[in-house]
Image: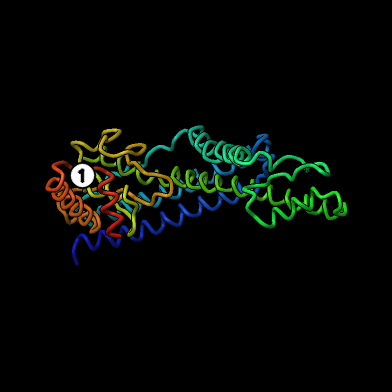
Amino acid sequence: MSLRTDLERLDATYRAGLTRRQLGVSLAVDALFKKLTIADILAGTPAVDDWLDKSTTIAMAVRGKIADETATYFTDLSRLTLPGARPIATVIAEPPPLEQVRTSLWVTGVVSARKRIDATYAAAPEAFQPMAPAGAPPLAFGSGNSLLEQAFLRRAADPETPQPMRERAQQLMDQGRQVALQEEAAKSGEMAGAAAARHAVNVSRDSAIETAKADRRVIGWVRVTSGRPCFFCAALASRGPAYDDDSFDESDPRFEGPGRHKVHDHCSCSLRPVTSRSHEEWPALTQEFEDRWKALKEETNRLHGRNPTMLDWRQDFAARQ
């Protein structure tokens, strides 16, 4: 059995745990957000503060569990890449300031929801006005294309319609508007959940970088993607390992993305410390993506006399999926 095969089995076990943790944080924070009402979100009631406190606590608690699992993963990694030697000197990264996490959740959750609510109002402000007086032109609701909406509006504005029926029509429309607002706001709960999960899982990625700095036998790290990564993560993986002569820069202008490991919300990539330049330490997909990038570079230079851009890569990547 090859070193690459052993490493990929180790990666698979570790990443399965990361994925469960990531999903758990996302769902928990999202579920808590969905309990907030529109009034809570707009007014910033104590319920919002409670959501923020609980969500931050969840993210940091799971981060601690991932830190323990990462230390074990690095020790197991040492047995494969440095057999007979002392284990890699694992350095678990310090957690980010709590205020940084809270701000991230506030922006992706509450601020985002407020913008969505505002946009819903702005798209059809007349739909959220009180019922028109009897005899007045029908009120527009939403796009106005729904036959059911039009029937309700005609009934609500028709002075010949019995009052209970008119009130019921208005009540149904109001309920529909409220549901529309709540659904828009709920989308921000998913965003906040993804952000919370990213903060939790980043301990794995940050620790790989800190460990590479601390132990001279670790010469860099390689990006380990899922079996079906997005084009952006595949492009980063195509670089192969990032080595100590260029890997500790805060950013790489060739690729967009936040931070040293350039992960996005919902990203499932992990980083694995590497101890040699042997391709045996490369995941098979990393090798495949590097080969794809080289082939694309040759083709783009031949056809257009230039190196490929991220747009070229994205189009080529989509065509191969």
Question: In the image, what residue type sits under mark 1?
Answer: Pro
Label 1: how many Cα within 10 Å (few below 14, some 14–19, many 20+): some
Q: In this view, does 200 lie to the left or right of 245?
A: right
For the point 21% across and 48% down, the residue is 240
Residue in the image at 26% along x and 41% along y: 212
Count of numbered circles on the image: 1
Nearer to me, 46 or 115: 115
In this view of the protein, which residue sits in the foreground, 121 or 10? 121
Q: Is 20 on the left-hand or right-hand side of 184?
A: left
Rendering colour mode:
rainbow
Residue 9: quarter of image: bottom left
The image position of residue 115, as x and y in percent, is: 57, 37
Specify whether residue 53 is in view: no
Which SS class for mark 1?
loop
> Where is residue 20 shown, x and y percent of the image?
45, 57
Residue to which mark 1 is pinned: 308
Q: Position of residue 4 (x, y in %)?
A: 21, 60
Picture quadrant of residue 226 = bottom left
Q: Where is residue 18 in the image (x, y as percent from the top left)?
A: 41, 54
Asked if residue 115 is positioned above or below residue 86 in the image, the reply reads: above
* Quadrant location, the N terminus: bottom left
Is 5 rendered above or below residue 121? below
Which part of the image, by quadrant, shows the C terminus? Answer: bottom left
Q: Nearer the viewer, residue 180 or 68?
A: 180
Pick out the residue farthest to the left. Answer: 302
Residue 184 in view here: yes
